[in-house]
Amino acid sequence: MLDIRCIARRGAFLLDVDLKLPDPGVTALFGVSGAGKSTLIAVLAGLLRPQSGRIEIDGEVLFDAAAGICLPAERRGIGCVFQDTRLFPHHDVRGNLEYGMHRVRGRVRRLQFGHVVELLGLGALLERRTHQLSGGERQRVALGRALLAQPRLLLLDEPLASLDAARKEELLPYFERLRDELAVPIVHVTHSFDEVIRIAQQVVVLDGGRVALAAPLAQVCRAPVLHAITGSEVTGTVLEGTVTRRDAAEALAVVRCGDIDLRVARIVLEPGMRVRLYVAADDVAIARERPEAISMRNVLRAQIVTIEPAEGSALVHLAVGSEQLLARVTHSAIRELQLVPGADCFALFKAVATHGRRFERAGATA
Amino acid sequence: MLTHVESQALRLSLEVAALSVLLTLPFAIACAWLLARRQFPGKALVDAVVHLPLVLPPVVVGYFLLLVFGTRGAIGSWLNETFGLRLVFTKQGAALATAVMSFPFVVRAIRLAVENIDRGLEEAARTLGAGAWDRFATITLPLMLPGILAGTIVAFSASLGEFGAVITFVSNVPGETQTLPLALYSAIQSPDGDVPALRLALISIGLGFAGLVLAEFLARAVRARLGR
């Protein structure tokens, strides 16, 4: 349980948030730069003192302006992984990892040195000096250092932002393992929606220092507010489901989401796996009649819920069985197909355009 | 190899310089940290006072030391009565005079190092559970080390060479306050002192050279450790 209600000032910037996360799990803190993500992180960590308000974690008050309470950062038990890693240059990797481990006062040591080293693949790096590490290795060490301080909440401040795509790809599986194998609640700051889809269970969207939205991921993707903030890049639908069949020869898997079956290509999925699928609105087409002889593997009976005008095009919200899908189409398509709310139609999209990620709930066994 | 006067002056110089460094460092570290990190009223004044020995003639510094730390001076008489510590005409006094003279150099070197420390590292230490003193001892101080080392070397060499403030405050007493430069000065003053003066000058050069080599060696070791 995380309960934040505060107003904090940093220079001319004003953060004014009111946020309750009953089960933080992995929460992505999302927003464009200048939205207040880092300020909120600093407030949570205790590195920035708010002007007013109250912050509470699991029933313990960290900050209460009215009662004059402000627990210093070193006593909050909140771990931080910074974008610039902030490894101590005068310690080797082992020294960095052990720094927080030696300062765990009173809290239970749930995460053992050996386990964290193994989980993050740090075994071969222990005797290295920090300046001998690559960018990805530095982030892994920073992550291990934060974990070994036995945090009750882990704050990740854009840990992947300074890495190139290949390094990111190398590091993301570690974050996924972290989410799946350790029951440490995580607030993950990012402005990359791909990271959000891969890691988060719920999303908090900040805009201009205020919470624009806080909801489970699937809802957030459909919310018009997100489109206004991030543009079309992240307009789409996130669906969660279970793999029911896999056709190895065709490299195709069938994923059951609610009461619909989706065909997904290009990723290795085994039956029984929980997966999260992302279907971009730009990849979904609409037909009034069931098309014959078409290469698109997903042809789903749908009904138009609403049509939301967007710049140069329109976003069509479709009800597909128990699920929802977003499709971006042109105004001329809307006219010619006479698309109106309530109309029956078919949603079409390619199996290769469906991005799937393996996904387990935190705490669940793989 | 060395005459009695020479070895006595050399030993005394090293002793005074070492004592002076020990005396300077704690104050210089505190002062450098305050000037680099804290805003307080009168900061500009403190900064000016610290740097005063740089612009004053050493004789003036020696004279003021005599006024304050002399046997009838405010602090001097208190030290004498409480601890039986007499500074005038003693090597402790010589160390104090050289400490005051080298103080600004040491503060500058350490302050530069403090300003170069990434504050983010201290924040990271905070989130890992380190309190204020813990952070200072385990993060700030070790990262100040290059500056402290540079400051120590500067202070040590300046102490070996200090003349004006020393001779004014503690005079030129062989075996007690007659360091190398003072012995050299005495040799030059005496009618047949040409050879002893030259020998003392050569010892000074040798000492300075050894100091520079050692300093470079240590600086490299520290840099390698910090990976710069």
Image (cartoon, helix red, strand yellow):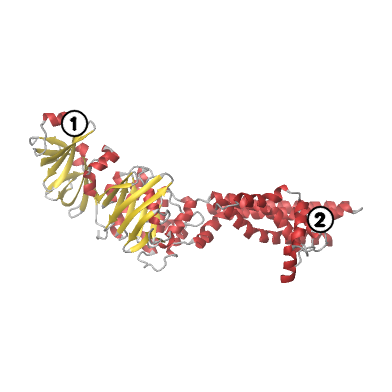
Give the residue number, with chain letter if any, for mark 2: B182
Q: Secondary structure at mark 2?
A: helix
Considering only vertical position in the picture, is B36 above or below A165? below
Please tell me how crowded label 1 is: few (under 14), some (14-19), or many (20+) other residues with Cα within 10 Å: some
Above or below residue A225? Residue B10 is below
Q: Is residue A220 left or right of residue A97?
A: left
Tell me the chain of label 1.
A
Q: Is the residue at mark 1 from the same chain as the one at mark 2?
A: no
* Residue A267 seen in the figure: no
Q: Position of residue A284 (x, y in %)?
A: 18, 38
**Residue A106 drawn at (x, y percent):** 40, 69
SS assignment at label 1: loop
Q: Nearer the viewer, residue B134 or A164?
A: B134
Name the kind of residue labelled 2 in the image: Leu
Query: Residue at 81% of width from left, 54% of height from top?
Result: B200
Circle 2 packing at 10 Å, graded few (<14), some (14-19), many (20+), is: many
Q: Quadrant of residue A34?
A: top left
Residue A74 visible, this orientation? yes
Q: Nearer the viewer, residue A53 or A314?
A: A53
- Residue in front for this viewpoint, A105 or A93: A105
Q: Residue at x 9, y 39 (%)?
A: A342
- Label 1 to label 2: alpha-carbon separation: 94 Å
Q: Position of residue A17 (x, y in %)?
A: 33, 51
- Amino acid type for the residue under numbered disc 1: Thr
Q: Position of residue B210 (x, y in %)?
A: 71, 53
Where is mark 1, residue-wise? Answer: A330
